[in-house]
Each structure stands twice: as structure tokens, then as C-alpha cells.
Amino acid sequence: MSDSHNLRAKTYWKENIRIVLSLLTIWFLVSFGMAILFVNILDNFHFFGFKFGFWMAQQGSIFCFVILIFIYVYKMNQLDHKYGVDEDQDHFSPDNTYYKNEESKK
Amino acid sequence: MDVQTLTFIFVGVSFTLYIGIAIWSRAGNTDDFYVAGGGVPPLANGMATAADWMSAASFISMAGIISFVGRDGSVYLMGWTGGYVLLALLIAPYLRKFGKYTVPDFIGDRYYSNIARLVAILCVLFVSFTYVAGQMRGVGIVFSRFLEVEITTGVLIGMAIVFFYAVLGGMKGITYTQVAQFCVLIFAFLVPAIFISMMMTGNPVPQLGFGSTLADGSNTHLLHKLDQLSVELGFGAYTAGKKSTIDMFFITAALMVGTAGLPHVIVRFFTVPKVRDARISAGYALLFIAILYTTAPAVASFARVNLINTVNNANYKTTPSWFKNWENTNLIAWVDKNQDGNIQYLAGKAFIGSPQFIEERGAEGERKISNSLTESRNELYIDRDIMVLANPEIANLPNWVIALVAAGGLAAALSTAAGLLLVISTSISHDLLKKIIFKDITDKQELFFARAAAALAIIIAGYFGIHPPGFVAQVVAFAFGLAASSFFPVILMGIFSKRMNKEGAISGMLIGLFFTASYIIYFKFINPSANSAENWWFGISPEGIGTLGMFLNFIVSSLVSRITAPPPGEIQDMVDDIRIPQGAGASYHHLKS
């Protein structure tokens, strides 16, 4: 492996870690933060007929989890593309054939 | 048509569908058998993962538990969904890039050690068997209640069906059957929820109905009404918590981390063609899971209000037929303590232990029990597991909805059982036989062993379903605790730390396992009477101790790896390689040979 290649891989990995850590911070805040540690404080606020802390614990946190994963997918696809490591560049990959087969079935 | 005929039709049609799919998608080689040839489209994988994940516990038990414990039930809601964020961000894409069949494969290769592989195999087997016993039991309960056959017959029918498509179809058969099972189970869960939400609040969306005002003209919010009723009967407000904050924190964390470390879930991400597909299919999976998981708390509160309104102070003789049906299945019991012929439902246990029915009938025609009674004025015992199954009957929904729920419960239990059985058979045929004992068997022989192991696993699981060991409920904490304290840290560091070596990983896994297992065994089996908050370490219950075990694992493995030799160069290159998505298809086809 050449040095420039190595360097690119390193900065790719650093950016990857940054994305993951920022999303995990939100993950922690909406579940452990809002729905467990501060749930009683948030219960003083009302939200569509729910106490807000209770709603976060039984509904809100789950919605946030789903959104977080989709943001991650979007961000990572962008990052892969920026560094040219996305799998569309695997010319020899058998997966391409698989997709072609799928398309021809339609 | 009566409920029984309808149930026969619904269950019969869904089973035919599963078998048809299995024949259409049977496995031809080990690649098909283990990872469905690595060619499952992400959306299908998302549905299959959701069905794999949502077991009899999610479908039948979870809403029931929440119904009885209120806000504290959030540990399951958040724990069993939040884990997917960890899985998607920290594990699934990298293990897909690694491109092999199993979790022990990754641990054995990354830590260049067959001891590590063996520890992983033992954990996989323990976790999966624990889990599968509960599923077969769920199948038995649904059959015995709705089709009025013996639990044993029910379990045998379930075994035969799973045997057919798991042994024949392997991962390929299971994946496409799970897609069908997901559709059946989500439909079966939503239909009654929508009906009940409409009836009680006028809002067809259960997630919104749950926060709306009651449709009875009183203009009070459903949750407010529920809080009032619960406080009146001495249960404490439904929307307030009873567990300590630290215990809530640790249990939620153990369930989340355990979810991300469960082998039957991780292995699903080996079946998609690309790293990018692994990421997005984790997103689809959680989206599909969230449909059920955000409906469950709504169902829990509707069922609770309905239950209290229907049974409290009702005359036993005039109770609806579901009450007596479930009494006949041993899951409801009533003792007329004050001999007024009415059911008093209050906080506290009506008697000690689970009901021991005797032949004799009481003055009102109720089944008598031989348990010793408590001081409490409460006269009613209700098993939490019946809430979802009985909910349509309690709410007087049409018979076809009741039959649909039965088919949904079976779909949930069977799909999870199949996924687990596959993991068990793979770890025996691939990890144990192919990688450790008989290294030179052919693909055909390996496939034969995989099928034989699946068949054997079904028989063992069926045995546990018919003769459930008393500890099944207790060992669920075990499964998550062990996955959290053993697999998760080792997999995570295998990807994110290049310095982590064999010595560190093995000592970390063993310490995590040993610590977590001893804590749970002590409080659940050796000294159950001491199992209360004042004796727990830092107030952490056995359900949450896996989190502490995980921290110990991280600390011990980091320390040990610092003072021992770093992993060899080719392992460090391998870690570099799995961090980059490019070439997943190639690495997969290269490595497996």
C-alpha cells in the first residue's frame, strides 16, 4: 500500500468516527438522557396529551433511533463517495451481476 | 363462523404459505444455507431481520408486561430498539465487509485463536438455546388456547413446520419465509390495535389515540384516566416509574448492548450483497420493528383500561367467556376472599406463587386453587402473557380478528425460532466441525452436518417447549447479559482498536462472562430471597448487570492487551481492510474459499 493511499484511509476513518460519535451522542441524549435521567423533569411539560418524559420513554426515543440510522446511511454514502471507496467502483464484484439480474427480471 | 374454525383457516393458510416459500427457495450449498448466497435485497433483509428479532416475547409478552408496570416497561421498548443504532453504526457494516458466515468466525479470525472461537461458540449455543425454548413454549400456548389441543401437540406441530423450512431451506428458506411472517405478524398486531384505538378514543392511529381523550364523552385523557384508576386500586400512577433511575439506566443499556451482540441478529447482515446494503437494511429493520414497538405501549394502556373496567367489581357468573376460557388454560385464577361473588382486583398478590388448580369448583363455579392466600384484598391472578392474546376478546372484536392474532403470534414465534436454530446449526457444523474438529470435510458433508445439527436442535428446543424448565423466564436476563458482557466489547474492539490482541480479548470475554453469570446465578438461583434492591451492588438488578460486565470486559481487555504483544501484521491489515467498504463482494468470494 502506498503512503498516500494510507493517508486517505486514515482521514476517511477519522471522519467516519466523527460521524458515528456525533450520532451516538444524540442517541444517548434522547434515550438515557431525556427518557431516563431527566424523565421526571420533562414530565412537567405536556406534548399532545402526553407527559413529555413519558412520551420520550415510550414513543419519541424509538422514532429518533430510526431517524438516526437513516441519517447515518446518508452521511456514510456521501463520505464513501468523497473518498472513492464506495462499492460502485468494484468492477469485478459479483454483486453487479446480481443487480443486473434483478433488473432484467422487472 | 366461530373462532376455532377461523383460527384453523388463518393458521392453515399461513403455514401453507411458509411451506410453499420454503420449497421455492431451498438451499443448494453451504453458501445458501448459511447466508442465503449473500444475495438478499436490503428491503427483504430488513423485513426478515424484523421478523427474526420480534419473537413471541415482543408479540405476546411485551405489551402485557408494559400494561402491568407502566412507564418502567420503557426499558424493553428502548432497549430492544436502541440496540439497532449500535448495530448499524458500530457493527453491521464492518462484519459484512469481513464477509464470513458467523460471529465465532469473526472472533476466531480476528483474534487468531481457536480458544477465542470456542468461547464464542459456547456463548452462541447458550444464548440461542435459552431463547429458542421460550419460542416453542409460545407456540404451545397459542395452539392450546385457540385450537384447544394439548400444549404438547401444539409444540409438535410447530416443530414439524420449522423442521421443514429450516432444515430444507437453510438461511435462504428462512429469509423469505420471515418476510412473509413479518407481514402476517405486523398485520395481526396492528388490526386489533387500530380497532381498539377507534373504539376507545375515536382516533384510528394507536400512537396518537394513546394520547387522546376518551370517546365516552368524559373529555378526560386516556392516560389521565388510567393513572386515576391505577392509583385508586393501589397500583400507583401508570405514567410514573417505580424502578430506581440507576436500575432503569443499567437495564436499558444491557438490553441495547445485548441486542447489538446477539448472534442471530448479526448474522442477518451477512446475507446482503454490499456494505452499503448492510447499513440501509439495519435502517429498514428498525423501521419495521418500530411499527410494532410504538404500537405496543398504546395497546398496553388500552388493554389495561379495558381490563380494569371489565373485571373489577364484576360478578364472576356474568363475566364474559374469555375470562373463563383463560381460567381453563390456567392463566387466570380468582379466589373469592370476601365471598361476595364479585371480583375484587387491587394491587398486591392474591396468593403465593402461580396458581395450583384442584379439581373442585367453588361456590360461584370458579376453579379452586390450593395456594396459600395472602393478606391482600386482591382476589385476582392474571398472567401478563395473556394481555395481547385476550385483548381482542376483552374489547369484543369480531372473531376473525381473534383468529388473526393467533396466526400472528405463531408467525412471531416461528420466525424467531427458525433464525435461532439456524445459528445453532451453523455454529456446530461450520464453527465447531469445519473450523476446529474436521478441517477437511467437503462442502456437501458440511451441508449435511448443518442439516443434521438443525434437526437435532429442533428436537432439543421442542423438548424444552413441552417440558419448560422453571428457569426459562429467568434466563432471558442471562441471554442479554451474556451477549452484552462477552460479544459486544470483543467485536467492537476487534473493529475499532488495532492494538487489541488475542490475550486481551480472551481475558476480557472470560471476565465479563464470569462476572455477569455469577451475579445472575447468585440472585436468581442460589439465593433468590436476597434478590432485592438493598442487596444489589449499586442498586443494579440482575437484568442490568450485563452493563457492568461489559465495562469490566472493556477495562480488563485494554489493560491485558497493553502488556502483551500486539497482534501480527496481517491481522492489523485485515482490520484496515474491514474499515473500508470497497471490495466487499470480492472479499466475500475470496475469503470463503
Image (tube, coloured by chain):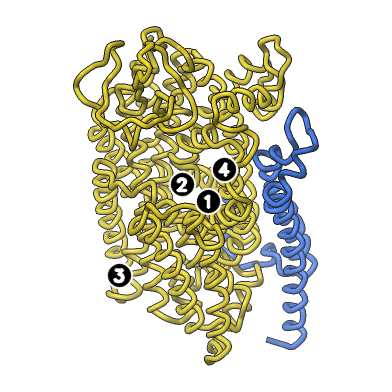
User: Counting other residues with Cα less than 10 Å from the Cα at mark 2, is it few (<14), some (14-19), or many (20 or more)?
Assistant: many
Label 1 sits on a secondary structure element that is: loop
In terms of sequence position, does the residue under pointer 2 or pointer 1 come before the other? 1
Report the Cα–Cα distance between label 3 and label 4.
39 Å
B470 shown above or below B513: above
Q: Nearer the viewer, residue A41 or B253?
A: A41
Q: Amino acid at mark 3?
A: Leu
**In the displayed structure, does residue B481 sit left or right of residue A74?**
left
Q: Do residues under tags 2 and 1 come within 8 Å of each other at their CB atoms? A: yes
Question: Which chain is yellow in the picture?
Answer: B
Report the Cα–Cα distance between label 3 and label 2.
24 Å
Closest to the camera, between mark 2 and mark 4, is 2
Identify the residue position indicated by label 3 in the image. B433
In terms of sequence position, does the residue under pointer 3 or pointer 2 come before the other? 2
Query: What residue lies at 65% left-to-right and 39% top-to-bottom?
Result: A58
In terms of sequence position, does the residue under pointer 3 or pointer 1 come before the other? 1
Identify the residue position indicated by label 4 in the image. A105
Are marks 3 and 4 in one subunit? no
